[in-house]
Image (tube, grey):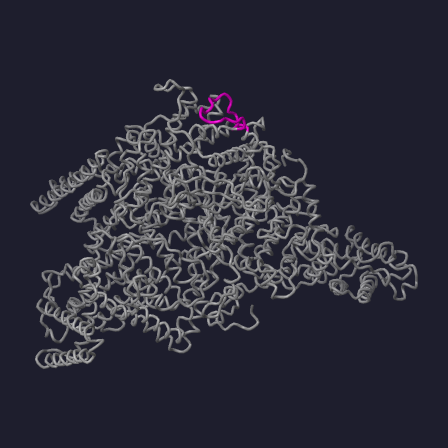
Amino acid sequence: MSLRYRHGPLSAPPRPPEEEEPFNIIPVHNLLADHPSLRFPEVRAAAAALRTVGDLRRPPYAQWHPSMDLLDWLALFFGFQRDNVRNQREHLVLHLANVQMRLSPPPDNIDTLDAGVLRSFRRKLLKNYTNWCSYIGKKSNIWISDSIRSSSDQRRELLYVGLYLLIWGESANLRFMPECICYIFHNMAMELNKILEDYIDENTGQPVMPSISGENAFLNCVVKPIYETIQAEVESSKNGTAPHSAWRNYDDLNEYFWSKRCFQKLKWPIDVGGNFFVSASRGKHIGKTGFVEQRSFWNLFRSFDRLWVMLVLFLQAAIIVAWEEKRYPWNALTDKSVQVKVLTLFITWSAMRFLQSLLDIGTQYGRVSWETSGLGVRMVLKTVVAAAWMVIFGVFYGRIWAQRNQDREWSREANNRVLTFLEVAFVFVIPELLALVLFLLPWIRNCIEETNWKIFYMLSWWFQSRSFVGRGLREGLVDNIKYALFWVMVLATKFAFSYFLQIKPMIRPTKQLLALKNVKYEWHEFFGGSNRFTVGLLWLPVVLIYLMDIQIWYSIYSSFVGAVVGLFQHLGEIRNIQQLRLRFQFFASAIQFNLMPEEQLLNARGTLKNKFKDVIHRLKLRYGLGRPYKKLESNQVEATKFALIWNEVILIFREEDIISDHELEMLELPQNSWNVRVIRWPCFLLCNELLLALRQAKELVDAPDKWLWYKICKNEYRRCAVIEAYDSINHLMLEIIKVNTEEHSILTVLFQEIDHSVQIEKFTRTFKMTALPQIHMKVIKLIELLAKPKKDMSQVVNTLQALYEISIRDFFRENKSTEQLKEDGLAPRNPAAMAGLLFETAVELPDPSNENFNRQVRRLHTILTSRDSMHNIPVNLEARRRIAFFSNSLFMNMPHAPQVEKMTAFSVLTPYYNEEVLYSKEQLRTENEDGISILYYLQTIYHDEWKNFLERMRREGMEKDDEIWTTKLRELRLWASYRGQTLGRTVRGMMYYYRALKMLAFLDSASEMDIREGARELGSIRRHGSFDGYNSERSPSSRSLSRASSSVGLLFRGHEYGTALMKYTYVVACQIYGAQKAKKDPHADEILYLMKHNEALRVAYVDDVLTGRDEKEYYSVLVKYDQQLQREVEIYRVKLPGPLKLGEGKPENQNHALIFTRGDAVQTIDMNQDNYFEEALKMRNLLEEYRCYYGIRKPTILGVREHIFTGSVSSLAWFMSAQETSFVTLGQRVLANPLKVRMHYGHPDVFDRFWFLTRGGISKASRVINISEDIFAGFNCTLRGGNVTHHEYIQVGKGRDVGLNQISMFEAKVASGNGEQVLSRDVYRLGHRLDFFRMLSFFYTTVGFFFNTMMVILTVYAFLWGRLYLALSGVEGSALANNGSNNAALAAILNQQFIIQLGLFTALPMIVENSLEHGFLQAIWDFLTMQLQLSSVFYTFSMGTRTHFFGRTILHGGAKYRATGRGFVVQHKSFAENYRLYARSHFVKAIELGLILTVYASHSPVAKGTFVYIAMTISSWFLVISWIVAPFVFNPSGFDWLKTVYDFDDFMNWIWYRGSVFAKAEESWERWWYEEQDHLRTTGIWGKLLEIILDLRFFLFQYGIVYQLGIADHSTNIAVYLLSWIYVLVVLGIYLLISYARNKYGAREHIYYRLVQFLVIILAILVIIALLEFTAFKFVDLFRSLLAFIPTGWGLLLIAQVFRPFLQSVRLWNLVVSVARLYEIMFGVIVMAPVAFLSWMPGFQSMQTRILFNEAFSRGLRIFQIVTGKKSKGDL
């Protein structure tokens, strides 16, 4: 412990007097205040360094106070805000002090700021700035020599750092534009230099003044103009609906500063007249910079062209080789012709290059202007060159065959021409070879890209446009080899599989089809000449699967690689409590080794010798070698520290109500008392051990002492149990008998006898082992008597007498006479006592309120009696999981913990908008339509935790159960809120960091005496039967959320608070807290309550203040709760240039609060996360990872593992959490190592704060394109040369969505986000700048995953439409007649597609990860259970969601943030609601596929064989059924007959509701229908065109089926089809006629309306009779034609929606709406039919409930009651 601050103990952090200005963490303005953090000399040193203004020229127009410092000086010169200065002053002082504390060895003079600290901080903070200067070729304006020898000018360093932080702290939305900040800093630093060097202004002859100065000048003159430009651009984006190419987003504006032109155009002071400030909606503006985002699927080809080139070239080569039909490909390649044909690959390759260059021009022309003309020249040149290569290859290839055909053989001349071709090809591939060489030598590549030499720029100009990011992304050689090997394996497997099982089997059927002549077409065939179109249709599904199946192989390999990496990380070695028992004795040493800092010598850490020692030490710990735990006997400090930590963890389990009071006693490590000589292990380890020892003693009756003791000592716990039981009985007996009585001395002698015999190893010779069981029984009886609240004295005496008798008479081997006993002091001298009065007067029982005594008695009773091996302690599954994970993690590799003083400081940031903070009384009691309240639901799901909660409440003074709604209401609300996804839960979790740091700070600095004394104090403190009885003296509010007064908290000396506050702060960005306070929203009171009870919690919000009539000013405000003043105080108020939200809400919210965070790291925590105390203990180890190299870089984001805590709610939540868990553990483990492409996924990752704040912050915020804002932080990090790692020895809890509708909304949000990513510049740059294998990893784990999901669904479409074409055209029949070839390739395709669709490739990682962590059998059992609960239906359904939203977003846009809600789902969702959500994404598509399958079944000759039909279409039928039924299977009470009936009525009301203009989509079908078409209004011309082309597929039904009708009479003339349109027109005519009649006569002259209807019906009957009579029309044709015409109508409707503006102008629109409504009713009935049937079937409802809530069932819950609302009367 450093002796720097021992000014005497301090009970709590003191507060400054009231009149002082409020401060955040340290009162920097008043260094004399009595605040624990000011005891650190480093804080004072940093503050003093800032005050060295010295002889600097004073600002002329402002008053200078002697107390002002360098930041005030900057503010007065440059016009920064006062609160910005105050905020950055504390920021800077805190950071410099923290860094100086970490120095090792400590500096010589502890009271001055170390120069090295400042220099390294300035380098880190301004690294991005210096890179930028070097990139654009400007000289840096930091006029300080960087050489080590030069004496550093400390004041100047501080001015530069201070200037940058002040600019950053006031830049508001400009913080998303890091190079814009660099530009501002560059110019202001120049002006600063001029002031420092005393330049004279040429114009005035006065000393130079900054170009902007005065109050708030920086905000008004620098920030505001740029901010207003962003605002204007956002307005011209029409709320994100305008195409991305039409307006500039944050990235475009930032990338303007990547070229020198910003200096010429913008100038300094900023010239607001420049065209940079003209927004897109007006005249001459600057277009997009850096990249133009265009909506198109071609983006996937543009960004990942290397992947597609590889796939296309292999496909072509494989077909050429397989065409020869040899057994192996190398057999075919012996043929010279085949070899030459393979050369056509080069033609294809050059064609793909040409396509790429055309796409570049097509998408990026918007970037070309006069200023960027070089770009245009390059694009045109590339197209010309690519076209030239195509021509060259074509010509040379043609010459080869011309020569060959002329010579009729492969003559020498022909071979020469082949060689010439190869020479040309060699020139073509030189760039690829160069890339390969650079891949093998990554450091050369990095060097070339990062060096800003003109020559390198010239060389790379042709290949990629120059960009500030994305340079030097190569990893080290070892990493290269690792991920290259992984991908070589994946690709080898894929290509072998594709060749032998996909391509080769297709060759023969293809040849047969092409050879097929005289096909009898059943319709008018346009491509009658050859069957190439048919062949194309056959190949289409094969090619689609071929293009996507790398995803499957990736999934398989990554699962196994992940498992191997996990094994090496020692995951899952302790899976349950049994395994923990085996290792618990090494556990104390593991805690000591990992969580306690060692006394660090000066050079201790880095050396190889020490690393080797660490490895050996870990091995010993892990496998229990060499007993490294040194038999932790109870006097050792290490054991006491372990006990303090372990007990604190267990105590917090009790606070969280996941264990009961009894379990607490079983689990805790009691402090040593009663003079026990061994460590007192928790009871759950010692259970049964004493009985086993007794049995051994009985069996080995005649064995010598040594042998018996050796047998007992084989088990450490047994040895301890025996000694503890003996010592405790010894102490107990002597404690309950009065001292100085004869009985006391007899017992003393007896125990001395026993001790002596043990010492001389003659115990078994002196005593009979057979008497031990009797003694055991009597001792138990005695202890049971002592444990009773009312103690029966006479029974106690009787038992003592019986014990005495057994001990004297039966226990000694030699029978002693009474005289001998008296001599030995084992019998009373007084004969009267022998007459039966022994012990009668001598017993004195302790005071009943002596909790310590009672506790020890209970423990002794447990040790003596427990027979079962207590495997079920604790009962709660969550508690067991947490203990197992914590104990396992301590045997994993993690960096050593530094002392709390020397650890890296960090903050946590949580964005919050308007979610629940704590549940209110009303929310808990209000019942839903089924009569279920939230509280009842929670009591049922968390049954044991509710019992523990009531037990705790009773212990804290609750007498009657109904007090829970009155005196204990707050506790009840907290209990419920900690089980939902509330802000209260998150805050409690994050405040465990603070609590853990305080405890660790105490343990770090406490001396051995402190700890020993403390342990004793704690042992004696626990009386009154309460664990927080000592709370009662403190203020009532301290019985608080965080219960900061935990047991160890009583020992604190005061400095712990200061240390913990300096190292940790928690900022919650409650964006609208100000508005909530003004509205008196209960949320605001609850947030205040959280602040009041959590000292380290700060709340940042945006305050809008009305100034004039309509004018508002906006401020970023930080508040805290002042315990001294007992109210909320405002700390900082920084003015913003305008409204906060310009882009996406969440990143803007994070960004405004980022300036209030502190420390070197910031952990991003979402509103649905939780944390655990035992994990918080490991945080300082995690932060040490920033010092280690991973590959060639240190990490900038530390990825943290998550535990999904919502899995137990229902089977759906379980599927979701299983899928998510495998991603956040195994998936990310592989991404980080070996693949090196882990990004940031909105998980609890820890960011290197200063690295990110200078590079654009921790997320991106442009409207729509950055809708998945988190992953862009990962992209940005990778592109700017960061490094993302993943660590699994620490975890954070996370909640997920639990109902199908929430899950679908979440999937839709993620899929839309991925659709937007496809268009983004980040993905394009990563696709081009990463090396080939990392690019593959990147593609298949981000956008590629969604693209491939879509490909699977497209395969089903392609297969079914292809089959339909074959069946209806008659090709299938003819082909079958000619040969009965069955198609192996199609079988392979269908099987592959089915496997994916069943979710098996999401299941494999789950199974593997589960086996790793819970054992193989458990994993298989879980998987089978999931299948029985229809998980495949769910996975198939969610594929549909992903496909729909991903595809629609890329084509038409329309991605929006979907609030998924965090509630509990036990509520039945109505049919209309499900229909609204899934009609377009699932139902309509399923009906379309179902229709194809039906038509195919009725018209295909193949389908006549039932088995063949089933085998071919089972996967498709499964898809159709899943898509239709899933929303109802996973809907509580989905098959309840009454609800189904109500739902249908509700649906029909919704369809026919006319409503007003203001009706919502939930009320009116028409409103919803318009909303579903919104994307067609915003999409571009290409989107509309593609939509129309896709809609044309519906006309194929009519084309195919009309030729099959009887009326066609086997004619294949085109006229048949054209005439069939008459039918469509007639139906439309009749519809128009009837609706006209209804409108005209329906109300008044109803008879006319009926007449019209009657005439129409008569006419129809007449027409049918005439047709039957005079044509080949059959009556069945009526029904068959429905299959033809209904799809046609739907197709027409969809096309009409595209032409909506035109149709509205010609008044046909109402007709479209009416027809659409009829279709909607038809779809509704089709979807409803199976649901209604299943509801009507008996027993289905209860089966569905069991499927939906099975996990909960297995925990013995009354879920059926929950769902059906049969609540028992006794419930609250």
Visible in this render: residue 522? Answer: no
Query: Could you tell whether 848 is left or right of 308 in the image?
Result: right
Residue in the image at 21% along x and 76% along y: 1642
Q: Position of residue 689 (x, y in %)?
A: 67, 59
Farthest front residue? 1109
- Report the front residue among 143 and 818: 143
- When the figure is inspected, residue 29 is found, relative to residue 1528, above or below; the finding is above
**1315 in magenta:** no
User: Splitting the image into 4 quarters, where does residue 543 fall?
Assistant: bottom left
Query: Could you tell whether 1457 is left or right of 626 in the image?
Result: left
Range covered by the magenta-colored residues: 48-67
Farthest top residue? 205
The overriding secondary structure of the stretch rendered in magenta is: loop
Q: Position of residue 1190 (x, y in %)?
A: 44, 40
User: Splitting the image into 4 quarters, where does residue 815 fall?
Assistant: bottom right
Residue in the image at 56% along x and 39% along y: 898
Q: Position of residue 884 (x, y in %)?
A: 55, 54
Query: Could you tell whether 1360 is left or right of 1244 in the image?
Result: left
User: Splitting the image into 4 quarters, where does residue 1545 fall?
Assistant: bottom left
- Report the front residue among 388 and 1053: 1053
Visible in this render: residue 1013? Answer: yes
Q: Position of residue 1748 (x, y in %)?
A: 43, 67
- When the figure is inspected, residue 1450 is found, relative to residue 425, above or below; the finding is below
